[in-house]
């Protein structure tokens, strides 16, 4: 039901009235995240300026049983920040201060609205940086990175957000505030910090994050190599890892992804090459030089048709600009597209990509591939034209690709999360008992069920699961209907 007047007045009492948006036109800005195929206009948008205001707003939600969804920059790709039609969005962009930098102990304390790249910019003067680097790092926020446990191109060597967050201050769904973890990352009892990281905003709202900083590597070497086939590029990845080499990053792009990226940023990739690898090594100069030569020999042994070694920081930046522009650049070659996210064992990369190609042909839709080859984290982009009635077919293909990853011994998601997009596929990966335990944990944190409802776990009946019927947020918004 729509929010009553008492709830609206309560929100205006704990926030500045101008920070409570109710105009449907202004609220429409918040109707979706990067998964634009799902849209819901929230009843209100709240824009707190402090952690105390976030807690006060959540207490109002708890008192009036108003569902709420936290939102950062809106760059998520799984519908995790999709609003609830009769609920509120709590935007965290105004909590954007870097509160403390400790170069001695190599940590920083930041608010959730600080962008990923701004952390590195703030600590670069000390020879430090923040390692997780999603492709959207110029605009995505630390709060969103915590919610999704974001990774990025360098996660092969350096891990994900959870490996670089020591502590989080969290507003729980009842409005109380707790700190999970510590300045050292150590804590007594259950690892609640680890539980919260990657929970996709379903357990509370982060208001402060203590991150671990790393020393800037002494040397960085980057190459861009073309191959006659995706299979040949995949064999290079396997051989590099088998040789005991742990690159900072190993990224792969296929011909379609390269075409889009080159059209957008002209980074120097080879148009028409079936596959390209970006391999980066970092560390002590002597070690880096030796392993870099090994990687080059492996590339040549597998029929590399062109090998370009970045000779300067500018050339290295250009190579990465092409890779990180790929997602957005696909919009230049297709009116609409979905970005999927799944993980498969490295040894099954070629087999999985062959299967995806066959599924693409069967569906009559193009699929561009750009992904973290080093850890088997695929990002197939399904291209379609919504105006031509291809949306349903594209959605079916993206779901089938995610479930294929599970079939191959992998998982539904590597870093983009489950959100709304893949909740109905969760039974493909987890048993009924697994999902029941997850639901019990969630209920323990949020017994009212008001914190980002309808995400991650399959909604009964709508996803074909037995149980008491509960309307999905998309159904309540009139986007879908119950059969």
Image: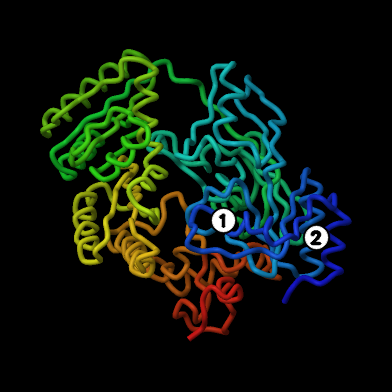
Q: Is residue 426 left or right of residue 343?
A: right
- For the residues labelled 2 and 1, say whether their Cβ atoms are less than 8 Å apart: no
- The numbered dot on residue 59 is 2
Q: Position of residue 300 (x, y in %)?
A: 13, 28
Q: Position of residue 104 (x, y in %)?
A: 63, 19
- Residue at figure coordinates x 38%, y 66% from the top left: 391
Q: Secondary structure at mark 2?
A: helix
Q: Secondary structure at mark 1?
A: loop
Tell me how far mark 2 sits from mark 1, CA to CA: 20 Å
Question: Of the residues under marks 2 and 1, which one precedes in the sequence?
Answer: 2
Question: As rendered, which of 297 and 45 lies closer to the eye?
Answer: 45
Q: Position of residue 44 (x, y in %)?
A: 73, 61
Instruction: Judge whether 291 appears above or below 379 on screen.
Output: above
- The numbered dot on residue 199 is 1
Give the crowd class for mark 2: few <14, some 14-19, many >=20 residues within 10 Å: many
Give the crowd class for mark 1: few <14, some 14-19, many >=20 residues within 10 Å: many
Rendered-image quadrant of the N terminus:
bottom right
Instruction: Judge whether 450 appears above or below 369 on screen.
Output: below
- The numbered dot on residue 310 is none
Instruction: Judge whether 197 appears above or below 322 on screen.
Output: below
Location of residue 370 by image quarter: top left
Q: Is residue 239 left or right of residue 88?
A: left
Q: Position of residue 295 (x, y in %)?
A: 22, 26
């Amino acid at each position: 039901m729509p929010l009553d007047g008492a709830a609206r007045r309560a929100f205006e009492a704990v926030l500045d009235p101008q920070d409570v948006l109710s105009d449907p036109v202004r609220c429409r800005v918040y109707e979706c995240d990067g998964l634009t195929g799902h849209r819901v206009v929230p009843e209100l948008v709240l824009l707190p300026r402090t952690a105390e205001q976030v807690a006060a707003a959540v207490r109002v939600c708890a008192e009036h049983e108003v569902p709420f969804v936290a939102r950062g920059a809106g760059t998520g790709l799984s519908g995790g920040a999709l609003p609830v039609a009769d609920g509120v969005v709590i935007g965290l962009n105004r909590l954007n201060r870097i509160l403390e930098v400790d170069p001695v102990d190599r940590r920083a304390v930041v608010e959730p609205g600080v962008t990923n790249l701004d952390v590195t910019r703030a600590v670069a003067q000390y020879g430090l940086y923040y390692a997780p680097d999603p492709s959207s790092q110029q605009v995505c926020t630390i709060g969103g990175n915590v919610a999704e446990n974001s990774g990025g191109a360098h996660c092969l060597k350096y891990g994900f957000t959870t490996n670089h967050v020591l502590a989080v201050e969290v507003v729980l769904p009842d409005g109380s505030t707790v700190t999970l973890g510590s300045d050292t990352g150590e804590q007594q009892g259950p690892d609640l910090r680890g539980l919260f990281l990657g929970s996709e905003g379903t357990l509370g709202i982060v208001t402060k994050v203590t991150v671990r900083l790393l020393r800037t590597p002494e040397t960085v070497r980057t190459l861009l190599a073309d191959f006659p086939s995706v299979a040949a590029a995949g064999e290079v990845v396997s051989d590099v890892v088998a040789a005991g080499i742990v690159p900072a990053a190993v990224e792969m792009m296929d011909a379609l992804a390269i075409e889009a990226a080159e059209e957008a940023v002209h980074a120097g990739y080879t148009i028409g090459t079936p596959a390209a690898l970006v391999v980066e090594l970092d560390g002590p100069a002597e070690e880096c030089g030796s392993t870099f030569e090994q990687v080059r020999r492996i590339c040549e042994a597998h029929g590399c048709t062109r090998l370009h070694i970045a000779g300067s920081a500018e050339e290295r930046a250009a190579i990465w600009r092409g890779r990180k522009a790929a997602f957005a650049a696909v919009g230049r070659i297709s009116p609409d597209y979905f970005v999927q996210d799944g993980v498969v064992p490295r040894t099954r990369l070629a087999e999985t990509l062959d299967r995806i190609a066959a599924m693409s042909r069967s569906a009559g839709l193009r699929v561009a591939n750009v992904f973290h080859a080093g850890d088997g984290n695929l990002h197939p982009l399904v291209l379609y034209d919504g105006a031509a009635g291809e949306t349903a077919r594209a959605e079916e293909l993206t779901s089938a690709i995610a479930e294929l990853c599970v079939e191959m011994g992998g998982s539904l998601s590597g870093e983009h999360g489950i959100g709304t997009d893949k909740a109905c596929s969760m039974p493909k990966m987890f048993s009924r008992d697994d999902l029941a335990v997850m639901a019990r944990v969630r209920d323990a944190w949020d017994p009212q069920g008001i914190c980002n409802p309808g995400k991650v776990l399959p909604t009964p009946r709508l996803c074909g699961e037995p149980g008491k019927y509960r309307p999905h947020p998309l159904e309540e918004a009139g986007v879908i209907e119950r059969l």
